[in-house]
Amino acid sequence: MDYLLTEEQVMVRDLARQIAEEKIAPVATQYDESGEFPWDIIKVIAESDLFGIFVEEKYGGTGGGVTELCLATEEFSKACGGIAVCYAASALGAYPIILYGSEEQKQKYLPDIARGKKLAAFALTEAGAGSDAGAVATTAKKNGDFFILNGTKQWITNGGEAEIYTVIAVTDKTRGSRGASAFLVEKGTPGFEFGKKENKMGIRGSTTRELIFNDCKIPKKNLLAKEGFGFIIAMKTFDKSRPGIGAQAVGIAQGALDHAVKYAKERIQFGKPISSFQGIQFMLADMATQVEAARTLVYSAARYIDSGAKDISKISAQAKLFASDVCMKVTTDAVQIFGGYGYMKEYPVEKYMRDAKITQIYEGTNQIQRSIIASELIKESLKK
């Protein structure tokens, strides 16, 4: 479909597609097997100025928004969901600064992020605080002109590779979720270390690590907004970033569909390509329809957010929910079309299926998305 993209958006999409086809696709299996961080690909993306497409021009970006980020993320994900999330997770880490950073904080951090010189990461999840984001146990105690951070964050994408971390920590335990605050923590700060690198089922081309804070001394000027705004910052960040997960899911699903169509034309059974059989044709038709529907919802959500709308929680959650469910269904069907070959690592679709699963989990499980959507529906009904 023609989504009536602007000339600049078409350029972003086409450039990301070229990088995906020429640079990412040939090494996707290599990084999936090794689990190494794809710094060579990150360098290519940085040189192409794609890290700055969602950052204002005055901070070194190109002035785009969520839509441009989704276009690039989708194209990268067609080739490799793991490498794509290395890119997208830097945007997740940057959004709190974009949304709530002071002018000084924006001038200090955003230009390096926009150039791809430094990666960012977002640190909310803990062993006991996954879907229950209000259960954060990491603390930040005020000590003069500093805050002292103690605690551990878990499953942080870009952990250990990023230079700039947005960290949610509790500054007042008596206030529950309203007692959480957000801090900017730089790699190399004394008392800030990294734990084990996780051995994951999918998105293995990205790095996921623990963050460990042991009397980590953070200047007060690194506090985002003000004390007690941490939970709000986290939720508003997810409202902006969830369509990016939807775009990752659309890209993974489209990549799997493309492989399935190609294979169906080449695979001969009973003297004919399996693409000639109605059973396979109907599967491919459903897969293509589901992917296009997911893409339409993701693009619509991104454009709505970029319009400056305030009531974005529901559409953001819907985009992430629907696209990731479609992604899991389509990649599973792609494996089915490949049959026994689909289950083998020599063929590409088993990786797409493994990469798909995480899109239903991170940045809020799909069960949490359904809770958000229902909550927003109820709020809307009360206003009528």
Image (spheres, grey):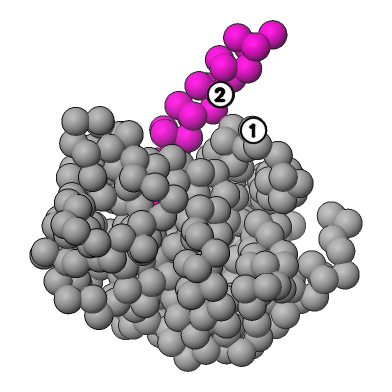
Q: Which residue is mark 1?
A: 311
Which residue appears farthest toward the front when viewing the image?
A: 144
Residue 316 appears in which quarter of the rendering? Answer: top right
Q: CA distance from mark 2 to mark 1?
A: 9 Å
Which residue does the image show at 79% across and 67% down from the upper left? 9
Callout 2–callout 1 Cβ contact below 8 Å: yes
Q: Is residue 98 left or right of residue 278?
A: left
Q: Amino acid at mark 1?
A: Asp
Instruction: State the image coordinates of residue 378 (x, y, percent, origin top left).
Output: 56, 15
Q: Position of residue 148 (x, y in %)?
A: 17, 59
Is residue 48 magenta-colored? no
**Who's the residue at 11% across and 64% down the image?**
215
Q: Quadrant of the N terminus?
A: bottom right
**Secondary structure beneath label 1:** loop
Q: Nearer the viewer, residue 33 or 113?
A: 113
Nearest the eye: 55 or 302: 55
* Crowding at mark 1 (Cα within 10 Å: few <14, some 14-19, many 20+): few
Residue 383 forms part of the magenta stretch = yes
Q: Residue 147 or 352: which is nearer the viewer?
A: 147
From the viewer's perspective, tell me whether residue 6 is left or right of residue 201: right
- Tell me if residue 42 comes above or below residue 89 in the rendering: below
Quadrant (top left, top right, bottom left, bottom right) of the C terminus: top right
Instruction: Write the start and end of the magenta stretch as one range.
Output: 359-384
Find residue 164 and report its image quarter: bottom left
187 on left or right of 254 = left
Front one among 70 and 285: 70
Q: Nearer the viewer, mark 2 or mark 1?
A: 1
User: Residue at position x 64%, y 78% from top?
Assistant: 60
Q: Which residue is mark 2?
A: 376
Q: Position of residue 13 (x, y in %)?
A: 74, 71
The answer to whether 361 is drawn above or below residue 47 in the figure is above
